[in-house]
Amino acid sequence: MNLLKKNILVLFITFLPLITLSQDEQGQQSFRYRVPEREVHSPHRATMYSAVLPGLGQAYNKKYWKIPVIYGLAGTFVYLIDYNNKQYIKYKNAYSDMNDGLISQFEVYTNTEILGKIKDSYRRDRDFNIILLSFTYVLNIIDATVDAHLYNYEINDDLSLRLEPTLMNTTYSQNTLGISCSFKF
């Protein structure tokens, strides 16, 4: 097959789903092009965007105000991780120096047990902040997915809750007072 025939075949296969046969009023068949439907807001795309770059799914959903919140939380946790890690390394070195009998920069601490507790405290805080940063990342993805699912959801202004007193019959045919609750949405 020459190149021209291959190109025509590829174009035909590509545009075949867009061409439909229809009959007009006289019963004659004619070709009509089907216009592709409007693209639906994709939750999968929002999820992938947020997984690749936090906040990008929120931008896709046009919820721009959430982006600074995400990066503010992430920046705070990154700062706390860095601070606690530096303190952990400092106290870990002081703890090992004191165990080896070397003079430490923390001469006010005479007990290695105190330095060990401080070191463990900074390690625990660092690890907890890593968990919170991971939680923020996952929450960012979940938020983008839920927002994308609710993107085309129409919110009606006619939401109401109505409470009114009512009479109810019991099993022994006695009337009792009660409250009827009805939702309108």
Image: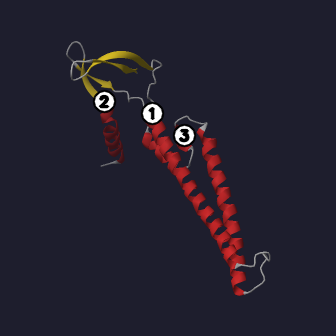
Residue at the (23%, 12%) spot, across then down: 25
The CA span between labels 3 and 2 is 37 Å
Q: Looking at the picture, tell me which residue is in the foreground, 48 or 1.
A: 48
What residue did someone put label 2 on?
19
Quarter of the image holding residue 169? top left
Q: Is residue 148 left or right of residue 117?
A: left
Q: Position of residue 40 (x, y in %)?
A: 42, 33
Foreground: 86 or 101? 101
Point 53% across, 46% down: residue = 140
Q: Amino acid at mark 2?
A: Ile
Which residue bears the numbered disc 3?
Answer: 58
Q: Element type at marker 3?
A: helix
Which residue occupies 73% across, 87% down? 101
Residue type marked 3: Gln
Name the front one of labels 1 and 2: 1
Crowding near pointer 3: few (<14 within 10 Å), some, many (20+)? many
Q: Amino acid at mark 1?
A: Leu
Earlier in the chain: of badge 1 and badge 2, it is: 2
- Comparing 176 with 67, the one in front is 176
Spatial CA span between label 3 and label 1: 13 Å
Counting from the top left corner in percent of width and height, residue 51 is at: 50, 50
Residue designated by label 1: 150
Q: Tell me: residue 8, above or below residue 89.
A: above
Of the pair 153 and 170, the residue shown nearer to us? 170
Q: Earlier in the sequence, mark 3 or mark 2?
A: 2
